[in-house]
Amino acid sequence: MKNINEIEKMFSQNLESPIFSILANFYYNKRLYEHAHKVCEIGLQYDTDNIDAQYMLAKILLINNEVKKAELILQAIIDKQPYHLNSLLLL
């Protein structure tokens, strides 16, 4: 896998790239929640059906105590994929 600087560069050059979910996941795992949130928001503008990014955004919203927004996202995920276990558990 490419190092994080290359992934950041690829994302900055093409905001529509599906690589945004990898970058957001990296930031989330490093507890850089604001960066992860921003990357998810940007990426989801272009790939609105990305379930992994929606789930990560819901987790970030819960960390930021935005429970209602997270709940809406989690419910939308479950509506699309009723057996998405992580979303069911988090909801």
Image (cartoon, rainbow, N blue to C red):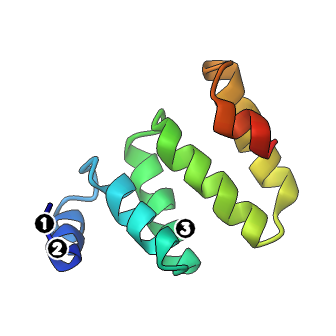
The structure residue drawn at horizontal position 69% and vertical position 38%, both measured from the top left corner, is 87
Q: Position of residue 49 (x, y in %)?
A: 48, 33
In the depicted structure, whether residue 63 falls above or below residue 19: below
| Residues at marks 3 and 2, CA–CA distance in whole angstroms | 20 Å
Q: Residues within 10 Å of mark 3 (few under 14, many from 20)?
A: many
In the depicted structure, whether residue 55 falls above or below residue 11: above
Q: Which is nearer the eye, 22 or 69?
A: 22
Identify the mark at residue 3; answer none if there is no mark: 2
Dot placed on the residue nearer the N-terminal end, 3 or 2:
2
Q: Which is nearer the eye, 47 or 32?
A: 32
Q: Amino acid at mark 3?
A: His
Q: Position of residue 1 (x, y in %)?
A: 14, 60
- The quadrant in which the C terminus is found is top right
Identify the mark at residue 37; answer none if there is no mark: 3
Q: Are marks 2 and 1 in contact (CB under 8 Å)?
A: yes
- Between circles 3 and 1, the one closer to the viewer is 1
Q: Amino acid at mark 1?
A: Lys
| Residues at marks 2 and 1, CA–CA distance in whole angstroms | 4 Å
Secondary structure at badge 2 equals loop
The structure residue drawn at horizontal position 16% and vertical position 65%, both measured from the top left corner, is 10
Secondary structure at badge 1 equals loop
From the image, tell me which residue sits under label 1.
2
